[in-house]
Image: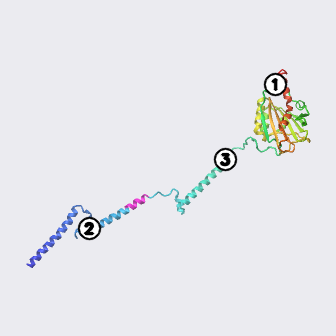
Amino acid sequence: MSRGGGSARGERDQESQWEWASEDAGGEENGSAGFEGFPRVGGRARAEAASRDLAAQAAEAGGRSGGAARQRRRPPRSDWQFPVLTGMGLRPEQQRLIVVIATVVVVLAGAGGLVAAIQSLGDHSPERQAGAAVIVPDAALPQVFHGWGSPKLFAPLAERAEDAKALTEKEVFGESELPVTKKLKLKLVAKQLDADCAAVLWGDSLLEQVSDGGCTQAARGLYASSDGRYVGQYTLLNLKDGESAAGLVDSLKTLYRGGWTHPLESSKAAFPAGGYSEAGGYALGHYVGLVWIGRVDGAEPDTEDDFVSLTLALRGAEKAIYRRVVAVTGPSS
């Protein structure tokens, strides 16, 4: 009986092993294909161990995949990295500094080339404006200038063709004294009438303009005040027409510092070089009158100096022009 009982137990143990094997096989048929790399025997414990190993492998693979994705999402390399400079071991910020310096050098070199090109185009010099450097070294010239257009009174003298008679020295400077006040007079100490206006004036722009204006005569008279304090000069230019005269006066408002009339020389009066003086320009038909006043010591006028009265006295030389208006229009006008 004992031998038969043992035989029965052996058969049951064998059936139990086949049941576990059948369960393992059924698991494969139910979709556990992931276990095909493991033995089909060994029971549920081995199957669970294999499942844990596969989960660990999947997690590791996912980590590598995520790391690769993160690596792909890294920001692009800096724009300031150049292969040549990077190969020299320079950091991006150092490369940026080198590029900036090189750009500045190129710009400066280009600017220098542009300046050289402009300078090579020509040597034109613009006309001198008020305050420009004096052309004649140490020349005496006014620091202040005012200009006035021609009054209607001188309209009959708008064309030299209507007033063809040439000026004379006696006609313009016939009076030896010009009264300023009851006690003060201007005395004529030198006079000169020139047919060449270029000999009386200086300054390229001024000479060109009087030449274009058809200047044929320039009369100058130098005066000294009776008290020895002042010096003055009156210059009268004979141009071809009123338009030329008005244009000359207007130009002198800005160009007088670069061109003016030469002062007459006299031991009794002189304009000090570099001293202060004032001037005025007056269009008188086709004539231009230039008044020039200053102190003998070259100082600026103070409260005792009346340059207005001195100017009016100097314009006494213009009586010759008034007489010419009468000569053209007749006494009744």
Which region is colored magenta?
65-73
Q: Position of residue 79 (x, y in %)?
A: 51, 56
Residue reaching furthest to the bottom: 2
The amino acid on which the numbered mark 2 sits, given as a three-letter code, is Glu
Tell us which disc is closer to us: 1 or 2. 2
Residue ID for mark 1: 162
Q: CA distance from mark 1 to mark 2?
A: 134 Å
In front: 291, or 71?
291
Question: Label 2 neighbourhood size at 10 Å, few (<14), some (14-19), many (20+)?
Answer: few
Residue at image location 81% in from the left, 40% down from the top: 278
The amino acid on which the numbered mark 1 sits, given as a three-letter code, is Glu
For the question of whether residue 193 can be seen, the reply is: yes
Residue at image location 61% in from the left, 53% down from the top: 106
Residue ID for mark 2: 48
Residue at image location 41% in from the left, 60% down from the top: 70
In front: 151, or 312?
312
N-term mark: 1 or 2: 2
Q: CA distance from mark 3 to mark 2?
A: 89 Å
N-term mark: 3 or 1: 3
Image marks 3 and 1: residues in contact by CB distance under 8 Å = no
Q: Which mark is residue 117?
A: 3
Q: Position of residue 239 (x, y in %)?
A: 81, 31
The amino acid on which the numbered mark 3 sits, given as a three-letter code, is Ala
For residue 256, above or below residue 25: above
For the question of whether residue 164 can be seen, the reply is: no
Question: Is residue 70 part of the magenta span, yes or no?
Answer: yes
Q: Position of residue 120 (x, y in %)?
A: 69, 46
Q: Please identify the quadrant where the N terminus is shown.
A: bottom left
